[in-house]
Image (spheres, helix red, strand yellow):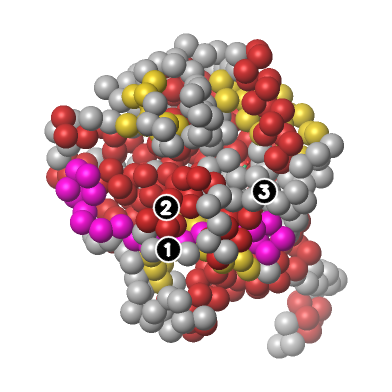
Amino acid sequence: MHHLACIHCGAKYPPDEVIYSCRACGHPLEVRYPLDRLGIERAEWAKRPLSVWRYREILPVHIQPVTLREGGTPLYHLDALGKEMGLPHLYAKHEGMNPSGSFKDRGMTVGVSMALQLGKRSVACASTGNTSASLAMYAAKAGIPSVVLLPSGKVALGKVAQALIHGARAITIRGNFDRALELVQELCDKHGLYLLNSMNPYRLEGQKTIGFEILDQLGYVPDRIVLPVGNAGNISAIHKGLRELRELGFIDRLPMMTGIQAEGSAPVVRAVQENLPEVIPEAHPETVATAIRIGAPVNAEKALRAIRETGGTAISVSDAEILSMQRALASREGIGVEPASAASVAGVKKLVAAGVIGRDERVVCVVTGHLLKDPETVVKQCEPPQEIEPDLPSLLSALRL
Ligand code: AN7
């Protein structure tokens, strides 16, 4: 049986305790398994469908999970963009191909299952959009109510649409994501809703399977995994999972964990580049990539460890670089992602130009959310379709044929 442990002071908590940070020191918790006693066979995993639940022995859920078939997302080789950057081994793991269109579904299939396992009957989160869409969807599947808190005017249209149609009680606040997160924590503390933001250590367990799938799809450990960073949960989760595989003896080294943030919202990058002991929150984060418009990442401590222990790095990219890479992925690779997701590939381009990423490196970018999440940002960048009279001469003339 697993237990919870503080990553800072090591305090231990039983698996059925509803707790989101260490009572002794306030630092983040993680789930720990008796890995040497689980008797996991890698060959057994290979027989199961590629999905979050392929790896169920190192997930905390013991009931029938609440699932919509998450995970098993494609890993694409980026032929055109890799060639242009001089990187023959550049890949994108398209997490936009999950049921709700983002990687959050991996966290929510585990997180909402845990809510039921722990006897909780309602769930809540604050969100820049994707977490709320995913939570609403899995709460609908589980048949329990959900509450989502969103920063007013700063959530992409598709994500709001999802939260609403899947039946979440959606509230927008006149404040940013960081404030919404403080508020929902208070709500959950006082009223017993189950909190499914990424300080919930069980939710991150689902997300660590991104790293497992990458290894299973490539057949080797890549040199580097690159992610957009907001609350810094995903980069921490993938690192944690890969550490477990190393402990199990399945791999002997870890990829360099590399985080990309938007220039106007880059507290983790600053901490890495200035070698600060901890992340200093950014009071007024701003970026076109609203998914990662987050100034006070709750998993900063875990993320700094992930980056530093693996010899990775973090850099920021401008909104213009993000949007340009969103267009390049769409028009040259056929991969449609939302702005935050394009940040990871834009970051790789910048790191190659700076000589940080070597040409022979095998690099996997996690592209985290689908293009259709944020149609407004897409339409703003493109010429509208040309309208013509409904006859062949007009069509031929429009096509200059
Ligand atoms: C597409 O939905 O925080 O660094 O509330 O939606 O693990 O926070 C979304 C984050 C990257 C950053 N890409 O991941 C939310 C939320 C996309 C995202 C991130 C988010 P973390």
Disc 1, SS: loop
Q: Position of residue 352 (x, y in %)?
A: 48, 79
Q: Spatial distance from mark 1 to mark 3, Cα to Cα?
A: 21 Å
- What number of labels is visible? 3
Q: What x and y, as percent, mark residue 86?
A: 43, 84
Residue that badge 1 annotates: 312
Most foreground residue, 165 or 218? 218
Left or right: 345 in relation to 6: right
Q: Which residues are magenta?
A: 246-266
Q: What kind of residue is marked 1?
A: Gly
Left or right of 200 in this view: 257: left
Q: Residue at x 52, y 14 (%)?
A: 120
Q: Position of residue 222 (x, y in %)?
A: 32, 64
Helix, strand or loop at disc 2?
Answer: helix
Q: Amino acid at mark 3?
A: Pro
Residue at the disc numbered 3? 281
Instruction: Name the outermost residue toward the bottom.
Output: 401
User: Which circle's residue, 2 or 1, is located before the other in the chain?
Assistant: 2
For label 1, the crowd category at 10 Å Cα-Cα, with few meaning under 14, some 14 to 19 and many 20 or more, is: many
Dot 2: few (<14), some (14–19), or many (≥20) neighbours within 10 Å? many
Q: Which residue is mark 2?
A: 306
The type of residue carrying mark 2 is Ala
